[in-house]
Amino acid sequence: MSPRRQRPRESPALVAFGRQMRLMREAKKVKQETIAHLTKVSAPQVSKIEAGKRRATRAFAVAVDDYLGAGGALVNLWEDLNKDGHPVPIWFDWPVIEADAAMLVCYEQSVMPGLAQTPAYASAILHGNQEAVEARISRQAIITGGDRTVPPTLVIMVDEQALHRPVGTSETMSSFQRDAVSRS
């Protein structure tokens, strides 16, 4: 079994919130220690929130917004980034998390998952959007090792119909099926 990897410490959504909070705090010449005392969290915790390494609570965002006189801007940003309890969009951080995973498990009913698609299959699914195809295929580096010495364990479960459902041309399907057999 692959060793357990730590989740990434930074998220683009958290970095965006932290950067804006720091800019507002510094504009008012307020120290992190003051924010820590106000919000009853440690100064290192405030530093981690500003660096995008920790998620702020809504109560924290409200208290800091009020103290800095941000007029709700910081709370609105927090709400935009945390709709339904998750950074928005929910898939925003996924490539970073996926690249650091010890195991990836996916299930698909109708098509093969992106990590198992050939370029022609991906092109058919993505209607020829070459930029999207390249992004999808480049993600496969995480299962071939890429920059890592130990790639994650990959478990793919698909409904049998996904193997037989025509995607693209007959050559696309033949190539995909050969590739799937060689990888399994």
Image (spheres, rainbow, N blue to C red):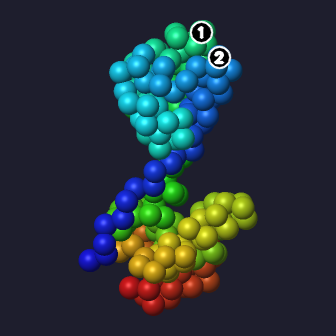
Mark toward the start of the polypeptide (1 vs 2): 2
Image x and y of residue 101, in percent:
40, 64
What residue appears at the point 50 percent right and 48 percent down from the top-left corner? Answer: 10
Q: Is residue 69 left or right of residue 56?
A: right
Secondary structure beneath label 2: loop
Decide: few, some or many residues near mark 1? Use Cα within 10 Å; few <14, some 14-19, many ≥20: some
Mark 1 or mark 2: which is in front? 2
The tag on residue 38 is none
What residue appears at the point 52 percent right and 41 percent down from the top-left corner? Answer: 52
What residue is disc 1 on?
69
Q: CA distance from mark 1 to mark 2?
A: 9 Å
What residue appears at the point 47 percent right and 39 percent down from the top-left corner? Answer: 48
Residue 127 or residue 36, whichever sits in front: 36
Q: Quadrant of the N terminus?
A: bottom left
What residue appears at the point 43 percent right and 76 percent down from the top-left corner? Answer: 151
Decide: few, some or many residues near mark 2? Use Cα within 10 Å; few <14, some 14-19, many ≥20: few
Quarter of the view holding residue 73 = top right
Residue 126 or residue 184, whichever sits in front: 184
Label 1 with label 2: CB-CB less than 8 Å:
yes
Q: How many marks?
A: 2
